[in-house]
Image (tube, helix red, strand yellow):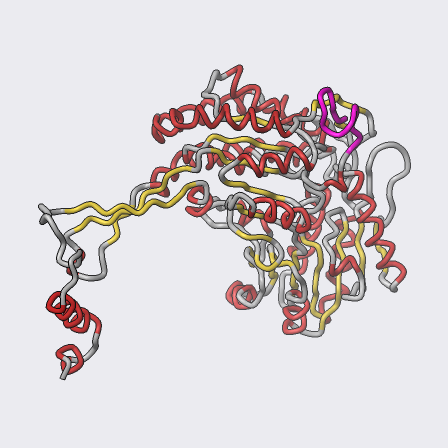
């Protein structure tokens, strides 16, 4: 996801210097550019203070057990249900989303709380390991999951709740204390939820938010025991280098350039509907957005015709609570420059701009829903992450060419295959170099299955969210062995060594590890 929170190049206006006392930054409405409010910047010293405070509260949070933590998370769920309209209002205000996209964030949190509360105990349960050698089975071997004391999350602006507290729910469920640094473009909805946790619910002091730019994010990396970062590839590498100084483990979900392949026997109407939704939902600002479409030649013209009709029918605007628009404003003023550059590059290199292709006149950060036909890999829009309301389509001669081009990228986050038969779609999906692929469907069919790990290949990141690994990553694995029987004063393998002892050991290991009777007996 490009232009995420820690990018120094994506800083909004700040006041009173960088991060000294009294420094702040403005949060703007993407729909008209007006200022919502100033937010104080948290200095590195403030980050250290906050982290130390939640660290002190973490042992008790861990000690109340999963059942105790579940009760607090369920209270948060109920609070969200009671205040969703206000949260959605705030989300639209700071992000420029249409109402349907804004509401999705609270829906995800509700589902995530229920999922982790139900599945978490099983994912974190002690595991018994049977020793592979019979001579070792007089000991019980266990694998235990113990939480990192403080987890830090650095989240982007495109999903201010899903990619901040949504990632934080399994951390809290696992027993971590949690400090989140949201994007400086969209911190307000998260700040309200954290306020509610502390003030309205009176919950334990294990959830905090810190605000600022790259300096604040860097300080969080220094102070925490585990970091979850979602953002650009460039900033992810900065986070990883910073974390290396303290050997802090990280999970990184970075950029994407997700392909969609449409075969000649696919349901073209469904594929065209999917391309419009997958490319333009959330104004195209999703790491798993469809960013390039490859269509087999026999159905190319029909597909482009249907997709053009779909995109032309979309309504763009600020819809309040009315659900009367599909495409909103762009959240980051910096990202709109990238989108414009990609579209103009495609235009100059011979692509056809069938819809949109312009920044809307007037106030706010608006870019028209754009469909590009006859694209090719000489164009930025087919190779670099666009992260905006743009769908480029390329004609291919066959599936083999489509797969080759789909894999011709440094990214590997997701993809979609539309084929006549689901089995054929799966065969194609297994050839795609990406962590998440949907057949005859889109990213939501994968992302909504919270038991299914989601992560990127190549430069799209390391680590996963969701599934067992999505909560275990917030834990340290501890191996414990416990004797089953009364033990002697000294084990046979302990000091002192002797020729007789070593000879017995040598023969025993040969007997256990050689294959074939003659070899076992040394004949």
Quarter of the figure with residue 219: top right
Percent position of residue 200, x then y: 52, 15
Look at the magenta stretch and give its main secondary structure.
Answer: loop
Q: Is residue 338 left or right of residue 285?
A: right
The segment highlighted magenta reads: 12-26
Can residue 111 be seen here? The reply is: no
Q: Does residue 16 belong to the magenta stretch?
A: yes
Percent position of residue 321, x then y: 69, 26
Quarter of the figure with residue 26: top right
Between 387 and 154, the residue placed more toward the observer is: 154
Q: Is residue 182 above or below residue 245?
A: above
Q: Does residue 357 belong to the magenta stretch?
A: no
- Residue at image point 55% right, 48% down: 244
Q: Is residue 508 above or below residue 239?
A: below
Q: Is residue 146 left or right of residue 225?
A: left
**Quarter of the figure with the C terminus:** bottom left
């Amino acid at each position: 996801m490009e232009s995420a929170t820690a990018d120094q190049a994506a800083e909004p206006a700040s006041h009173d210097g960088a991060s000294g006392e009294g420094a702040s930054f403005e949060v703007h409405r993407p729909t008209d550019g007006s200022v919502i409010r100033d937010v104080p910047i948290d200095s590195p010293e403030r980050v250290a203070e906050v982290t130390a405070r939640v660290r002190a509260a973490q042992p008790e949070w861990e000690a109340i057990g999963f059942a105790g933590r579940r009760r607090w998370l369920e209270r948060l769920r109920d609070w969200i249900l009671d205040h969703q309209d206000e949260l959605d209002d705030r989300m639209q205000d700071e992000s420029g989303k249409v109402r349907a996209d804004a509401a999705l964030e609270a829906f995800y949190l509700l589902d995530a709380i229920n999922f982790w509360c139900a599945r978490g105990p099983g994912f974190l349960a002690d595991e018994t390991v049977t020793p592979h050698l019979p001579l070792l089975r007089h000991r019980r071997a266990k694998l235990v999951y113990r939480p990192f004391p403080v987890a830090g999350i650095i989240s982007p602006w495109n999903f201010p709740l899903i990619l901040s507290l949504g990632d934080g729910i399994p951390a809290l469920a696992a027993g971590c204390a949690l400090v989140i640094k949201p994007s400086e473009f969209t911190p307000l909805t998260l700040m309200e939820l954290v306020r509610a946790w502390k003030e309205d619910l009176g919950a334990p002091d294990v959830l905090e938010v810190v605000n600022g730019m790259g300096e604040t994010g860097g300080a969080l990396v220094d102070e925490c025991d585990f970091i979850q970062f979602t953002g650009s590839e460039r900033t992810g590498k900065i986070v990883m280098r910073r974390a290396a100084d303290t050997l802090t483990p990280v999970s990184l979900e970075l950029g994407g350039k997700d392909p969609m392949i449409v075969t000649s026997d696919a349901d073209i109407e469904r594929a065209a509907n999917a391309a419009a939704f997958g490319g333009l939902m959330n104004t195209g600002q999703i790491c798993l957005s469809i960013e390039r479409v490859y269509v087999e030649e026999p159905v190319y013209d029909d597909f482009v015709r249907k997709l053009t009709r779909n995109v032309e029918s979309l309504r763009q605007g600020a819809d309040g609570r009315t659900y009367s628009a599909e495409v909103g404003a762009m959240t980051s003023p910096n990202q709109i420059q990238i989108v414009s550059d990609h579209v103009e590059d495609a235009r100059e290199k011979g692509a056809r701009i069938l819809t949109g292709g312009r920044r809307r006149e007037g106030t706010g950060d608006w870019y028209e829903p754009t469909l590009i036909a006859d694209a090719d890999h000489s164009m930025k829009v087919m190779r670099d992450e666009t992260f905006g309301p743009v769908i480029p389509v390329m004609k291919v001669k066959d599936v083999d060419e489509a797969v080759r081009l789909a894999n011709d990228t440094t990214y590997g986050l997701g993809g979609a295959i539309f084929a006549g038969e689901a089995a054929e779609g799966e065969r194609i999906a297994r050839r795609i170099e990406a962590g998440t692929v949907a057949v005859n469907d889109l990213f939501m069919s994968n992302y909504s299955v919270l038991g299914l790990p989601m992560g990127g290949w190549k430069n799209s990141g390391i680590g996963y969210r969701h599934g067992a690994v999505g909560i275990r990553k917030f834990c340290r694995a501890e191996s414990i062995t416990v004797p089953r029987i009364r033990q002697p004063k000294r084990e046979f393998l302990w000091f002192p060594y002797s020729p007789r002892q070593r000879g017995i050991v040598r023969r025993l290991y040969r007997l256990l590890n050689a294959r074939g009777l003659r070899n076992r007996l040394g004949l």
